[in-house]
Image (tube, grey):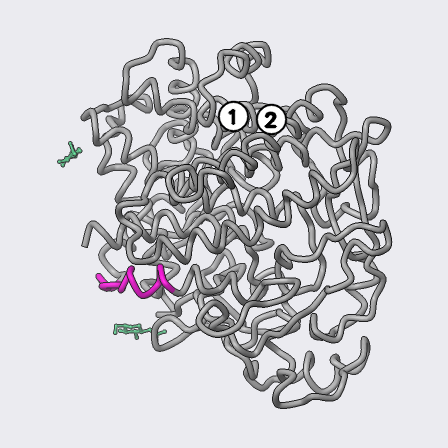
Amino acid sequence: MSSLFLISVLISLGTSIGIVQAGNPNYRDALAKSILFFQGQRSGKLPSGAAQQITWRSNSGLSDGQLAKVDLTGGYYDGGDNVKFNFPMAFTATMLSWGSLEYSKKMEPQLTNTRAAIRWSANYLLKCARATPDRLYVGIGDPNVDHECWERPEDMDTARTVYWVSPSNPGSDVAGETAAALAAASMVFRRVDLKYSKLLLRTAKKVFQFAIQYKGAYSDSLGSAVCPFYCSYSGYMDELLWGAAWLLRATNDVFYFNFLKSLGAGDSPDIFSWDNKFAGAYVLLSRRAVLNNDKNFDSYKQQAEQFMCRILPNSPSSSTQYTKGGLIFKLPESNLQYVTSITFLLTTYSKYMSATKHRFNCGNLVVNSSTLRNIAKRQVDYILGVNPLNMSYMVGYGPRYPKRIHHRGSSLPSLASHPKTIGCKAGFQPFFYSSNPNPNLLVGAVVGGPNQNDGFPDDRTDYSHSEPATYINGAIVGPLAYFANLN
Ligand SMILES: *[C@@H]1O[C@H](CO)[C@@H](O)[C@H](O)[C@H]1NC(C)=O
Ligand SMILES: *[C@@H]1O[C@H](CO)[C@@H](O)[C@H](O)[C@H]1NC(C)=O
């Protein structure tokens, strides 16, 4: 990107502030819906009654694990397909847990539902870590085969291949993230279910030990089963940092602090995602530096602030592009995932700063808690419809939202309305290629979102913009709780 282009983006960002309608999103409504979404992504045996309010879904994947003679039912499908990819699923669980730890008081009355969403993935991750000694199961369903079909999860007849890492085929990235998820979840349940919390923490420690004892990238061990879908492009150092940061927060054990220090400086990213967690780890670790003035964590605070300086639009070291409508624009595929993850870091660091009236500088730009909060609010508001198209990117929220999301279950008739099996290829015509709206509303799903020009085709075949994902929603729950309470 040329600097001239950057300047023109910044100028248009400045002038557009006046144009975009003020808007008054209902954050509480959006918060409730963002959590409800996870019920639509559930795999395994579904509960009945009020515990399963997305009623067009039914049981699926009931034999998951059988090919390895273990029970690996449960967990979430990552997006619009029927595969269980543990790497992004664990990241989603970590972000949901982080959200409920930072914003628990603000999350009422949604705290119970958030815990249920966390537990649904934590139960599955526990199975994956505990079923077989010396193995961590990391995924179910051959993604290449699955992607050739357009069928409901309830009809799934594709190979439910079981994937795992082990001492001879390691995966420090997926193990580090799984450890992070279990450690974070253990804190969520500490006051409500101590026994469960202890099991989560014990398992987190074990999985992390595996991650550091047998170092390697799971992409090297599993190849086309995880790449290009959820390849660990950023390597595994970020997951080791992130995993150790979560275990330190959960245990306060100096072992994890020493391990963190042994990892050295780490990267300087301008992104945060299921793949690259450096920035998340910096913000998480900066907490004690900002809130308690603990000098041991100063280097992370500096890295967290340098990250913010790469995000803020008026910062001299900014490397972040914004659309004319004011949306952070990182990458053309599923851009909103980066927006929600980065927004989580903005609100959370803003919250830390606000508690101690902390400020920092990006060159000559003075940044205080409101600087970060304002940018975060613009991102959340944009997603909820304050944008040039007046389009909410959360299904079922507001008067105008995506109607043709790239999601098998949502786009095919439900079992109740069409009990007969719809086979692998039978879903493409007439359902996938149809221009009709999806028959089933996946309430709360946030999709990949608009393009660089704030445009959105609402086209089911266009997965880059129309597919929802657990990790997009997993990261927006915290910021929605934050703004719901500020109102
Ligand atoms: C942050 O700085 C801006 C601009 O100087 C100022 O208007 C705002 O009141 C400050 N907010 C806080 C919380 O200090
Ligand atoms: C969005 O809403 C504003 C304010 O109501 C209106 O002026 C504008 O024309 C709308 N834009 C579109 C694309 O509908």
Element type where label 2 sits in the image: helix
Q: Is residue 25 magenta?
A: yes
* The CB of the residue at mark 2 lies under 8 Å from ligand 1: no
Q: How far across and how far down the image is residue 308, in percent?
A: 38, 31
Q: Which image quadrant shows ligand 1?
A: top left
Residue 203 visible in the current orientation: yes
Q: Is residue 396 magenta?
A: no
Which residue is label 1 attached to? Answer: 247
Q: How far across and how far down the image is residue 193, in percent?
A: 44, 43
Residues under labels 1 and 2: Cα distance?
Answer: 7 Å
- Provide the residue span drawn in magenta: 21-32
Residue farthest front in this picture: 195
Residue 450 visible in the current orientation: no
The image shows residue 91, relative to residue 259, as above or below, that is: below
How crowded is the residue under tag 2: few (<14 C-alpha within 10 Å), some, or many (20+)?
many
| Callout 1 touching callout 2 (CB < 8 Å) | yes
Residue 437 placement: quadrant: bottom right
Q: 184 or 304, which is in the foreground?
A: 184
Q: Which of label 1 and label 2 is nearer to you? A: 2
Which residue is label 2 attached to? Answer: 205
Amino acid type at mark 1: Leu
The image shows residue 146, relative to residue 470, as above or below, that is: below
Describe residue 99's horizontal placement relative to residue 25 as left or right. Answer: right
Specify the quadrant that holds the N terminus.
top right
**Residue at x-position 76% and y-position 46%:** 226
